[in-house]
């Protein structure tokens, strides 16, 4: 994979990594809406509510009035990330083909998926 990454996508990875580290969550995520605003979230694991970090970030964007997503990023140690539910959430707000970047806990880009 090329070392070159768009500066705006690098920002998403940094925000996702920070969100994960801030609360010691399994995952951190960040999304960028059509106006360039960013929204971050970490995994939510409550007895009555469970959301992946990506789902929580998409929900934050949607509840703030975002009408579309340009990109999403998730930082995770899991080899199973991103999940099908993550891709569906990004696709719901961003549309088919929206990039979802996956990075390791060091923030190093591993793969890019398309919603």
Image (cartoon, grey):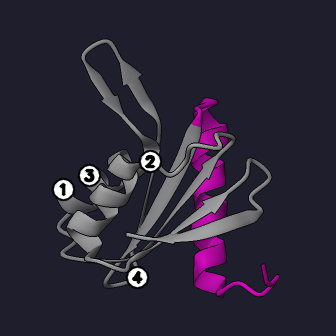
- The reply, left or right, for residue 48 in relation to residue 79 is left
| Precedes in sequence: disc 4 or disc 2 | 4
Q: Determine the residue positioned at 40% across, 82% down.
A: 36
Spatial CA span between label 4 and label 2: 25 Å
Secondary element at image label 2: loop
Return the mark for residue 36.
4
In the rendered image, residue 20, in percent from the top left (x then y), is placed at 61, 42
Q: Which residues are magenta?
A: 1-26
In the rendered image, residue 79, in percent from the top left (x then y), is placed at 65, 44
- The reply, left or right, for residue 101 in relation to residue 46 is right
Q: Are marks 4 and 2 in contact (CB under 8 Å)?
A: no
Q: Are marks 1 and 4 in contact (CB under 8 Å)?
A: no
Spatial CA span between label 2 and label 1: 22 Å
Q: Are marks 3 and 1 in contact (CB under 8 Å)?
A: yes
Secondary element at image label 4: loop
Spatial CA span between label 2 and label 3: 16 Å
Rate crowding at label 1 as few (under 14), some (14 to 19) or many (20 or more) other CA atoms within 10 Å.
Answer: few
Query: Which quadrant would the C terminus be assigned to in this image?
Result: bottom left
Q: Determine the residue positioned at 80% across, 52% down.
A: 106
Query: Which quadrant would the N terminus be assigned to in this image?
Result: bottom right
The mark lying in front, picked from 2 and 3, is 2
Spatial CA span between label 3 and label 1: 6 Å
Secondary element at image label 3: helix
Rate crowding at label 2 as few (under 14), some (14 to 19) or many (20 or more) other CA atoms within 10 Å.
Answer: few
Residue labelled with disc 3: 59
| Precedes in sequence: disc 2 or disc 3 | 3
Q: Splitting the image into 4 quarters, where does residue 109 fall?
A: bottom right
* Residue 6 vs residue 37, the one in the foreground: 6
Return the mark for residue 63.
1
């Amino acid at each position: 994979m090329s070392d070159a990454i768009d500066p705006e996508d690098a920002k998403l990875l940094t925000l996702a990594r920070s969100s994960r580290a801030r609360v010691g969550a399994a995952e951190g995520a960040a999304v960028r809406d059509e106006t360039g605003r960013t929204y971050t979230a970490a995994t939510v694991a409550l007895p009555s509510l469970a959301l992946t970090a990506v789902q929580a970030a998409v929900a934050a964007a949607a509840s703030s009035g975002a009408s579309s997503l340009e990109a999403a990023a998730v930082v995770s140690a899991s080899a199973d990330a991103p999940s099908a539910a993550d891709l569906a959430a990004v696709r719901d707000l961003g549309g088919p083909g929206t990039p979802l970047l996956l990075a390791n806990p060091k923030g190093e880009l591993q793969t890019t998926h398309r919603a």
